[in-house]
Image: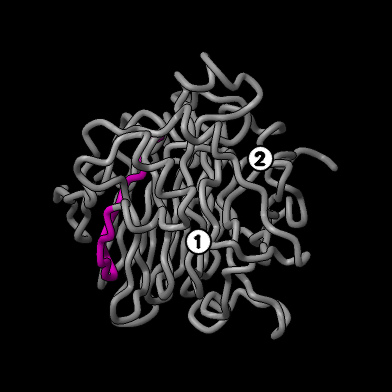
Amino acid sequence: MSTPTPYPFRTRPYLREKVWGGRRLVDLFSKGGDDDVPLGEAWEVSALEEGESIVDTGPATGSPLSEITELWGTDLVGSRASVEGFPLLVKMLDAADDLSVQVHPSQKDIDQHFPDADSKDECWVILASDDGGSILHGVRDGVDAEAFRRAVDEGRAEEVCRRVDVEPGQVIRVVPGTIHAICEGVVLLEIQQPSDTTYRVYDYDRPGLDGQPRELHLDEAMTVANFGDQPPTSVEGHPLDHPDAEVTLLIDVPSYRIERLQARRPATWSVDPGSVQVVSVIDGEATLSWDGGDFDLEPGGTAVIPAVTGSVTLTPTGDSLDVVVSGVGGGRLVGT
């Protein structure tokens, strides 16, 4: 196809059936799918070979994100992007059952032990949680590698992990090396490095979708897991000035930055040329407009804004709007 000029676009997610998945991505965010399929993940923004999201508006409609990334390069991803390809992976997850207890490697782990894998630093924004909805995040005080391995062998890995009740709006960073699991009853938005490297430690002896036990990676997990001081279980936001909206900085690390925008009227900002921006609507509806076009976003809708876009405006079409904006770390996203 001829190369279109970079422009903001809505995405169509890659949907993943999971043994622990449910139907709330359909019920809450109209993600579609067969009624008999346990939908676990919607990969809203992904350029990974394991599953790509698709451009869903404008001249590039139908193109995989990896193709657009290659065509537009820095004009799309921004000057601060330090990885090859699209710099983020953004998902929605529905845990109708407990996910496996697992851990992800850091870049240091990749360099020293697993050169064919990818580091994975991720952050969760809780969208919905049943009464008693919780996560596992890190190990309990006094649990060392030997005690943890013994608990895994005895089928009680979750008992030696920190269990944390969660509620909508809560933000949790999963630093590489942190043993963790999303538990039954939780729906969340996940923003992370573009990696699907997961070392599964314990999976409750349940079969996968094919009826066979799912693969475990205990040796790899024990190599990368952190049994020292454990990271905080929740991230506190910090307000940022903006004339049109309430903007909160949720997290800023080298791999990604996340801001939350809550508005009752049109909010305009200049896009930092250092980073692509991903807009995830978690409540309300809106129109995203720029000098050249516009499109509508519904609850659960996702937009990608190229770094060279200039100015954009997000206009609520109802009483209020709540969105999460993510991009490369190191610079403000929703500026003035």
Q: Given the current orientation, which residue lies at the most extreme top position?
A: 112
What residue did someone put label 2 on?
5
Which residue appears at 49% of the width and 30% of the height?
A: 78
Q: Examine the rendered structure and indicate whether residue 35 appears above or below residue 204.
A: below
> In the picture, which quadrant includes the N terminus?
top right
Q: Position of residue 165 (x, y in %)?
A: 25, 67
Residue 298's disc is none
In which quadrant of the rendered view does residue 25 lie?
bottom right
Q: Coloured how?
A: one colour
Q: Is residue 52 left or right of residue 125?
A: right
Q: Amino acid at mark 1?
A: Leu
In which quadrant of the rendered view does residue 176 lie?
top left
Residue 125 in magenta stretch: no
Which residue appears at 43% of the width and 41% of the height?
A: 149
Q: Examine the rendered structure and indicate whether residue 253 appears above or below residue 89.
A: above
Q: Position of residue 20 (x, y in %)?
A: 57, 69
Label located before the other in sequence (2 or 1): 2
Which residue appears at 53% of the width and 21% of the height?
A: 110
Residue 99's disc is 1
Q: Marks 2 and 1, how far apart in space? A: 41 Å
Residue 175 in magenta stretch: yes
Q: Examine the rendered structure and indicate whether residue 52 appears above or below residue 88.
A: below
Query: Mark 2 falls on what kind of element?
Result: loop
Q: Is residue 107 left or right of residue 170?
A: right
Q: Examine the rendered structure and indicate whether residue 53 appears above or below residue 315.
A: above
Q: Which residues are magenta?
A: 162-176
Q: Is residue 82 left or right of residue 3?
A: left
Query: Mark 1 falls on what kind of element?
Result: loop
